[in-house]
Amino acid sequence: MIKFKANGLKNILLEKSISINKLANDTKINAHVIRSLINDSISISPKNIISLSKVLNASFEQLLLNEFRNPIIIDLKKLDSNQIIQILLLQANFKSLHYKNITSYVEHLMYNSSENFYGDFNFSDKCSNIRKNLLGLTQAQLSSILNISETSVHNWEVGNTRPSFNSLFTLSLMTGFTIDYFFTDGSQLEISSYNLTEEKYSILESIIREYYK
């Protein structure tokens, strides 16, 4: 079980000029608990992570990782397959990620973002495509990495259940995508700025800006 810390909470409150008492009132989280989170003396529960993120309108990466740089957005309707593949290969190199079949992964992404496909990506489809193509894992292998049952992974992919926050966090680290990308439905990819030096972050941003021209 991952023990999360609200590493960015203090900075968020300062930036938004929100008092501890107001935050406690809005989130129904005890003010003493919030003070303890700010002082880094206790872990934060997944329930409180979600509550604080919603009330503060803050990303999970801001709240948990103290990462305030914007994620790098890949708009699937503005880029072609080769451009997306190049960006993902570069991210994998920068973060030492272990991608398996990026081409098949991107082909699936592009199909789901086309006019022929009704609706945005939901988590079940994201999970299946990432597991099978991007990471090249069986349901059994992924369940072993996440320390959960194989049935749990199967249920995610058929849309019966959603993952715990622990699993979402680990998937984020494995793929380099933001926690928020996994938590919400939608067709845009969000590359996490976490674990990127300023130089590498700037390189990715500049390449995407050039592609958008």
Image (cartoon, rainbow, N blue to C red):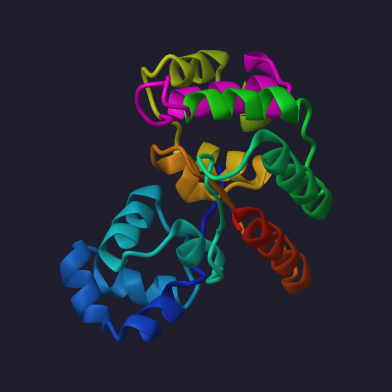
The spot of residue 136 in percent (x, y) is: 73, 22
Q: Is residue 148 visible?
A: no
Q: Is residue 77 visible?
A: yes
The spot of residue 143 in percent (x, y) is: 62, 22
Please indicate whether residue 109 sits to the left or right of residue 186 in the image: right
Q: Is residue 97 above or below residue 21?
A: above
- Residue sitting nearer the eye, 68 or 160: 68
Count of numbered labels shown in the rendering: 0
Q: In the rendered view of the protein, which quadrant contains the C terminus?
A: bottom right
Occupied quadrant, residue 67? bottom right
The range drawn in magenta is 114-141
Q: Is residue 132 above or below residue 88?
A: above
Q: Residue at x 36, y 77 (%)?
A: 35
* 135 in magenta: yes
The spot of residue 211 in percent (x, y) is: 66, 53
Q: In the rendered view of the protein, which quadrant contains the N terminus?
A: top right
Please indicate whether residue 202 sits to the left or right of residue 3 in the image: right
* 3 in magenta: no
Q: Residue at x 62, y 31 (%)?
A: 146
Q: Residue at x 52, y 70 (%)?
A: 7
Q: Is residue 95 above or below residue 36?
A: above
- Residue sitting nearer the eye, 22 or 84: 84
- Residue sitting nearer the eye, 28 or 127: 127
The spot of residue 8 in percent (x, y) is: 48, 72
Please indicate whether residue 11 sits to the left or right of residue 33 in the image: right
Occupied quadrant, residue 119? top left
- In the rendered image, the residue lying farthest to the left is 25
- In the rendered image, the residue lying farthest to the front is 213
